[in-house]
Image (cartoon, grey):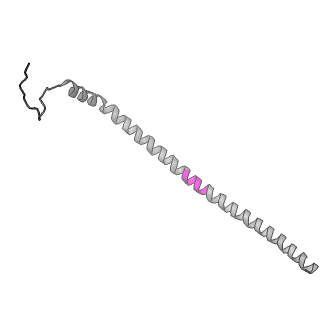
Amino acid sequence: MQPGRAKRLEQAKEEAQVEIELFRQEREKQFNEFKLKHMRINEYKAAKLDADTTKKIDEINKAVAVNKQAVIDQFLELVTDIKPELPKNFKATAYKE
């Protein structure tokens, strides 16, 4: 290999390394900007979802508070109003001692 050629190859290699590093830095910057932008969007969506969930839970709790006594009364009525009946498939048989 010629001495001048080796030097040019080394210089080209160094220039390529510099270009690669600059490219890597630029892409990393673009990625961080992309990530930051989408992180803000996701944080907004998460905050909105949390707010919607809290609102729904509050609505459900209010509905439970309003209907709680009516449900308890209806449940107690069903439990305490016992009507004994024979099963539909009951067959009368004579009991022998």
Q: Quadrant of the C terminus?
A: top left
Q: In the rendering, at what x and y percent does residue 88 appear?
A: 11, 35
Q: Is residue 66 left or right of residue 80?
A: right
Q: Is 89 in front, or is 82?
A: 89
Q: Vertical placement of 45 versus 17: above or below?
A: above
Q: Indicate the position of residue 71 as horizontal and vertical percent values.
A: 27, 31
Indicate left or right for 68 with 94 as reference.
right
Residue found at x 65% / y 60%: 31
Please identify the quarter of the rendering in which residue 79 is found: top left
User: Measuring 13% from the left and 32% from the top, which residue is drawn there?
Assistant: 87
Q: How many marks?
A: 0
Find residue 26 and report its image quarter. Answer: bottom right
Region in magenta? 36-42
Q: Position of residue 78 (x, y in %)?
A: 21, 28
What's the residue at 25%, 29% (across, down)?
A: 75
Above or below, 26 against 3 in this view is above
Secondary structure mostly seen in magenta is: helix
Is 48 located above or below residue 86 in the figure? below
Left/right of residue 12 with respect to residue 72 in the rendered view: right
13 with respect to 30 (left or right): right
Front in this rendered view, residue 45 or 80: 80
